[in-house]
Image (tube, helix red, strand yellow):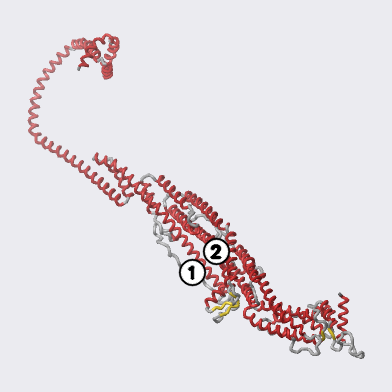
Amino acid sequence: MQATRSRRKVAPEAADGGDSGGKSEQPLLSSAICNGEDLGPFVRKVFASGRPETLLLHLRHFARSKESEIEDVCKSHYQDFILAVDDLRSLLSDVDSLKSALSVSNSRLQSVGGPLLSSLDSLVVAQNVSKNVNSALQSVTLCIKLMELCSRANLHLSNGSFYMALKCLDSIENEFQDKTPSSTLKRMLERKIPEIRSHIEREISKEFGDWLVDIRVVSRNLGQLAIGQASAARQCEEDMRIKQRQAEEQSRLSLRGCVYALEEDDEEGGLGGDENDGYSNGNNGLSGFDLTPLYRAYHIHQTLGLEDRFKQYYFENRKLQLTSDFQVSSMTPFLESHQTFFAQISGFFIIEDRILRTGGGLVSKMEVENLWETAVSKMCSVLEDQFSRMQTASHLLLIKDYVSLLGVTLRRYGYPVDALLNVLSKHGDKYHELLLSDCRKQIAEALADDKFEQILMKKEYEYSMNVLSFQLQASDIVPAFPYVAPFSSSVPDCCRIVRSFIEDSVSFMSYGGQLDFYDVVKKYLDRLLGEVLDGALLKLISSSVQGVSQAMQVAANMAVLERACDFFFRHAAQLSGIPLRMAERGRKQFPLDKARDAAEETLSGMLKRKVDGFMTLIENVNWMTDESSQGGNEYVNEVIVYLETLVSTAQQILPPQVLKRVLQEVLSHISEKVVGALLGDSVKRFNENAIMGIDVDIRLLESFADNLSPALSKGDANQLKNALAESRQLINLLLSNQPENFLNPVIRERSYNALDYRKVVTISEKLRDSSDRLFGTFGSRGARQNPKKKSLDALIKRLKNVS
C-alpha cells in the first residue's frame, strides 16, 4: 500500500514529461474504441510502463468528448422517444392484462405440472444414478479384467511361462492401460510393465547362459556318440567285407558251392531316438541334446523386439566356445586327449547344423560355414603339429582313425572334410616308415626267440591260429592232433607281424579320401618283405644258423614263407577292395628269394661239407684192382647211408622242390668230387676195373635218386640223376668201346655235353689196360693191341691237337 501511495505521488510529476507520449496515444485509443477493438494491449502497455493514470485520463477525456455527441443525438431523437414512451404505456396496459392471464394460466399449470415436475425430477435423478452405476460397473468390469490379466501374468511369471506373461503384458498395454479409470492402477502399470519385461529378459538370459554352459558337455558327449555310431557302422561294414572275403575264398577253394549270400543284420535304432521328437536327429538317431532353452530364449527375445541383439549375442558366445575348444592342453598327451578334442568340435557342429535347420533364422548358413572353415584350419594345424612330433606308428594310426571317423560323421551333415583327409594322406609316408621300423624290431625279436624247432600243436585252435589263418596248409584236410608243423615258431610270428602291417597300412589308407590305395599298400609290403624280413632272415642265416638241423629248419621255413607271401598279397588285395586277379597280375618274383637262396645254399653247403668227410674215403679205392667192386666202394656206401638218413628226416619238413634243389646240389658236388679224384694228382693211374667200380658207385647214387620217387616226381628224380651227369658221362666215355665218338659233335652234344675235353684228356691218359700195366707197352710182343685202347689213344691225340 505504501508503494501504491508513492506511485500516486509520482504520477503527476511524470505526467508533464509523458504528455507528449500520452497525446500521441490518445487518437489511437479513440480509434480503437470507436472501431470496437480490444483495449488489452493499451492496458498492458500502461501497466507495464507503470503509468495507469494516463490511460484513465485518456478514457475520461474520451468520455467527455462523447457526452456532447450523446446529447445531440438525444435531442435529435427526443420526439421519437416521446412517441415510443406513449406506445410503451399503451403496451403496459396490454402487458398487465396479459400478465393476469399468464398468472391464471400459470396457476393452472402449476397445479397440473407440479406432480409431473416432481416425477421428472425423480426420473432425472434416477437416470443420473443409473448412469453413474453403469459407469461404475463398466469401470469395475474393466478393472476386474485387468486384474485377471495381471493375476494371469503373475501366474505365468511364477511358472516360468515368460512368453505367455509377455502376451498378457501386451494385452494389458493394448487393451486396458489407456482405458483404465483408476489413475493408481494406471501409474502402477506404467511402472511395473517395463520392470516385468526387464525381469523376463534377465531370467531368460540366465537360463540361456546355463544352457551355454551345459551345451559344452552335451556337445562332447554328442560328438563321442556320433563318432561311436560311425565307428560301429564302419565295423559293421568291415564285418560284411570279412564275410564276403570268406565267401569268396571258400568259393575260390571250392570248399562250398560257388553261390553264396551275405546277410546283413538290421542294427537300426540301436542308439536312435523317436524320430518325431522335435530335437531328434532324424535318421541319425542322435536325440541326446535339448535345444528348448535356446529356442525359448530366441522366441522371448523376438517377442521383446530384441531379435537382432540376441542373434549377435548367441553367435559371439558360440564363437568364443569354439575358440576355447581349440585349446590343446600341454599337460595331457595329445594321444589321451585327441578323442575329447575332436568329439567336442564334432558335437559343436552337429548342434549348429540342427540349429541352422530348425532355428528359424537364428544362425545363417554363412556364419556356420565361416565357423567350420576356422575349425578346419585349426584342426589341420593341430594335426600337422602333433603328427610332426609323433614317433610311434600306432599313435598315428589311432589319431588318424578317429579323425577319419570325425570326417565321416560330419560329412553326413554336409561339412566338407577334404582338408582334414589331405593332412592324413600327407603323413602316410611317415606312418609307413614308422610302421616299418616297428616291424623291423618285432621281426628281429621273433627271429631271435626262434629255437629252430618244429611247432607241436595239440589243439585245433592252435592249428587254425598258426596255419589256417595264414593259409600255410599244404592240404585242405585237417590233420590229426597232436600235429607237428614243418616250420618253427618264427614263421607264424613273422606272419602275424606282416599281416598286422598289412591291416595297419590298409587301415591308415582307408577312409582317407583315396579310393585306390592298393599300389601304396603293395609298395610298402614289398619293402617290408624285400628289405626288412629278407634282410633279417639273411642276417639270421649268416650269423645264427648252426648245424644241419637248424639250416634245414630255416630252409623249410623259407618254403612255408613263400606260401605265406602269396597269402599276404591276396590279403592286401582283399582288404584294399580290388579283385584278386589284378593283384596276382601285378605280382613280382618271390620277395624273399635272397633269404631262400641263402638258406638253401647254407644247407647244401653244410651237407657238402658233411659229404666231403665221407668222400675222403675215396682215397682207399684200389685204382689198379684186378676185380671190379660189385657192391660199391666204401665211400659211396657211407654217403648213401647218410643221404638216406638225411632224406628220411628232410621229407618231414622240407617241401619236395626244396629237397630236390638241395639234393641236386649235393649230388652235383659228389659228382665233382669223383671227377676231381680221377683228375687229381693222388691218382696216378687206374684201370678199367676201377672205372667199373666207380660206375657201380654212380649207379648206386642214381638208384638212390630213383628211390626218391614217392617223395619226388619222376621228372624231379631225373633232374637229380642229371646232377651226376659229369661223372656219369665220364665213366660212360671211359667204358665205351668207341671213345672216339666224343669227337662227333652230335654224339658229344647228346651224350657228353657235361664233359670238359681238357679233363677228358688228363683222365684218359691215366687209364691203363689190364693187359698192359704200363699203358702203351705190351705184355707180349706177339699180342695184338686192344682196339678200345687204340681208339682211346687216338681220341687223346686228337684232343691234344685241338688244344
What number is the disc on residue 507?
Answer: 2
Secondary element type, mark 1: loop
Mark 1 is surrounded, within 10 Å at the Cα level, by few (under 14), some (14 to 19) or many (20 or more) other residues, namely few
Of the numbered discs 1 and 2, the one sitting upstream in the chain is 1
The residue tagged with tag 2: helix, strand or loop?
helix
Residue toward you, 471 or 433 = 433
Quarter residue 637 falls in: bottom right
Residue drawn at (20%, 14%) of the image = 5
Mark 2 surroundings within 10 Å by alpha-carbon count, few (fewer than 14), some (14 through 19), many (20 or more): some
- What count of labels does the image hold? 2
Q: Amino acid at mark 2?
A: Ser
Q: Residue furthest right?
A: 782
Q: Nearer the viewer, residue 518 or 121?
A: 518
Quadrant the N terminus occupies: top left
Left or right side of 67 for 359? right
Residue found farthest to the top: 16
293 sits left or right of 4 in the view:
right
| Residue 297 sits above or below residue 544 on the image | above
| Residue 264: numbered disc | 1
Tell me, yes or no, if residue 211 can be seen here: yes
